[in-house]
Image (cartoon, rainbow, N blue to C red):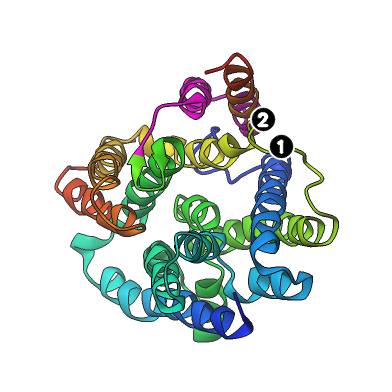
Amino acid sequence: MNGEPSAGPGRSDLAALALTFFALGVTTNVIVLDRVGSVGLTIGAALIVNSATSEFAYVAVRDAGGSEWAAILAGWVVASRFGLFAVSLGARLRVGPAHRAAAAVMSFDPNVTLAVQQADPRGVVAVFWRVTAAMFAGWIIGTLVGAGLGNVLGDAERLGLDAVFPAALLAIIGNLLRRGDGALAAAVGGGLCVLLIPIAPAGVPIIASLAGAVVALGVREPAP
Amino acid sequence: MTWASVVFLAVGVWGQRLLGMFVGARVVGRVPALARLATLIPAAVVMAVIVQLTLGDGRSLTIDARLAGMAVAAVLVWRRAPFVAVVCAAAATTALVRALGG
């Protein structure tokens, strides 16, 4: 992922990504199972909602004493980032409507970010599905293990596992940060998020970061 | 959480993804001035998610062991270290700083 921008992720990158999503699957579903109490519902939620972020937002609002609808609304708001990823991916996809719909519902941070960095439209599709397969395999196995066997990883915080996903994301945008416009988009997006976390409801700081991308449109892309 | 909450959550999550793909992407794909949004949106939004996961604690900001882990990750990404090394070093640093009481 830190090699040449045109070379997609290699086999070891995909294996590490699968492990990252395995850890995410275990830790997320241990928390959800603790609140839900049913193994079937925990696994069903992981597969049907298809967004750990939304599940976390729902659980957080319910934990804080919020109503069912407030919790669902929070789940929707935090999922808006996946809508933005679908915009990015869709702008680069050259495939039919059924293929687009399938790609849309599988739009996550790593697969879209790595796919849209491919220059060739066929490379976009190939990298998207290759990364999706690795992520999803890790996520499903992690979900089954977390919901079925409980917390096999032990104390996730003691092991530093909460740093795994943000570190993986940073590696994934590494090449974008080397471009002037990408670095500006990230700086403005990240900065807005810092300013808004203490004052805006969950999910809003992430949506607002879209402004970083718009601001960076004004910067000319440097020649490679 | 009930099966009904799962269905309602899914409608919002799937719906926004399909809207992005079939409405948002169509606009961005047809206006040449907006084409670069395809790579700029991930740069901005992923960085915001990183900030949230590194500094966020519910609705407040906090500096703890995660920031040390991410600082190490940032140096490794800058030095073009392999993905596996970035992720493992971030977890190990965070765990170490936490064990030392950070």
Secondary structure at badge 2 equals loop
Q: Are marks 2 and 1 in contact (CB under 8 Å)?
A: yes
Residue A6 falls left or right of residue A42: left
Quadrant that contains the C terminus of chain A: top left
Which residues make up the magenta segment? B61-89
**Residue A219 covered by magenta stretch:** no
Residue A214 falls left or right of residue A109: left
**Residue B66 covered by magenta stretch:** yes
Quadrant that contains the N terminus of chain A: top right
Can the viewer see residue A89? no
Residue matched to label 2: A158
Question: Quick check: A174 above or below A38?
Answer: above
Tag shown at residue A155: 1
Quarter of the image where one finds residue A38: bottom right
Q: Chain of mark 2?
A: A
Residue B36 falls left or right of residue A85: left
Q: Chain of mark 1?
A: A
Principal secondary structure, stretch drawn in magenta: helix
Q: Residue furthest front?
A: A65
Q: Residue at x 20, y 54 (%)?
A: A214
The amino acid type found where label 2 is placed reads: Arg
Cα distance in 3D space between marks 2 and 1:
5 Å
- Kindly indicate whether the residues beneath marks 2 and 1 are on one polypeptide chain: yes
Q: Position of residue A13 (x, y in %)?
A: 67, 40
Q: Residues within 10 Å of mark 1 (few under 14, many from 20)?
A: few
Quarter of the image where one finds residue A16: top right
The amino acid type found where label 1 is placed reads: Asp
